């Protein structure tokens, strides 16, 4: 095996070991592409591992992306369990659900990359700041490695970008699992909501020291 191929194989094994939730994906090709999209995201960033990618630095810088997405995958799985138990006939595509939960933030390796952030911050008039938020770039990456559009949709729609479209069943579960995770972390750490923490962390000129997503619209009850 060529040295490059051996290095990529080791990287994929490392990613698989870091997020055992991927073993729930029954489709072997889909499971492999979940690993590959993270390998691609890391390869084009300055991060060496999933653990190095930030989660939400404004809310809790000690939480990395790996910890967050594993929790979201578990939360989304349990949402599906409860809804299927109490609503007979409702069925989630569990492979799409888990795959989407594990890659919903894959674009953060791009958006949060410190080298890109420095360039965007220096000249926001050139390409914006950030040039692309992680849901958009994550959907691009997902389609680039051959993930199905159902999973790319979850990347694109899990955050505020999804407010303007109709989310799939699985995207709704991932969206609320993601929202619940950061809302509870923000409340536990600061007593504030996620949106309040992000607003306080943003300087008056709107350019953050660390690129991060804008707050979601609060869900209506």
Image: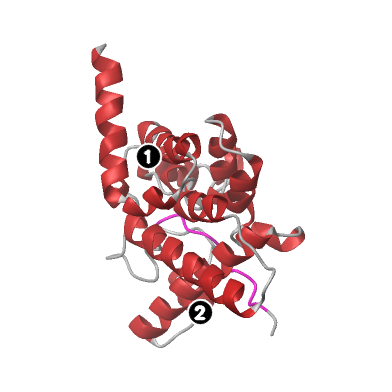
Residue at coordinates 47% horizontally, 58% vertically from top-left? 212
Q: Is residue 156 left or right of residue 13?
A: right
| Residue 108 position (above or below residue 79) | above
Residue at coordinates 50% horizontally, 75% vertically from top-left? 180
* Of 202 and 59, the residue lying toward us: 59
Question: Quadrant of the image for the C terminus?
Answer: bottom right
Indicate yes or no whether the magenta region holds residue 91.
no
At numbered mark 2, what does the secondary structure look like: helix, strand or loop?
helix
| Residue 218 position (above or below residue 119) | below
The mark found on residue 115 in the picture is 1
Disc 2: which residue: 196
Residue extent of the magenta highlight: 210-219
The answer to which quarter of the image holds residue 188 is bottom left
* Of 3 and 207, the residue lying toward us: 3
Residue at coordinates 48% horizontally, 71% vertically from top-left? 78
Q: Position of residue 91 (x, y in %)?
A: 64, 63
């Amino acid at each position: 095996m060529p040295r490059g191929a051996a290095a990529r194989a080791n990287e994929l094994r490392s990613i698989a070991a870091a997020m055992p939730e991927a073993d729930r994906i029954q489709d072997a090709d889909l499971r492999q592409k979940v690993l590959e999209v993270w390998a691609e995201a890391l390869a084009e960033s300055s991060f060496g591992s999933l653990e190095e990618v930030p989660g939400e630095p404004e809310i809790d810088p000690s939480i990395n992306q790996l910890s967050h997405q594993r929790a979201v995958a578990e939360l989304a799985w349990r949402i599906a369990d409860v809804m299927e138990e109490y609503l007979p006939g409702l069925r989630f595509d569990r492979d799409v659900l888990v795959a989407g939960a594990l890659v919903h933030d894959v674009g953060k390796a791009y958006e949060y990359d410190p080298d890109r952030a420095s360039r965007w911050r220096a000249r926001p008039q050139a390409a914006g700041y950030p040039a692309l938020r992680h849901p958009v770039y994550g959907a691009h990456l997902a389609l680039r490695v051959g993930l199905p559009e159902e999973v790319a949709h979850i990347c694109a729609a899990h955050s505020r970008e999804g407010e303007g479209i109709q989310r799939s069943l699985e995207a709704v579960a991932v969206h609320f699992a993601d929202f619940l995770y950061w809302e509870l972390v923000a409340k536990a750490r600061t007593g504030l909501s996620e949106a309040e923490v992000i607003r306080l962390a943003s300087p008056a000129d709107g350019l953050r020291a660390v690129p991060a997503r804008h707050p979601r619209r609060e869900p209506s009850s």
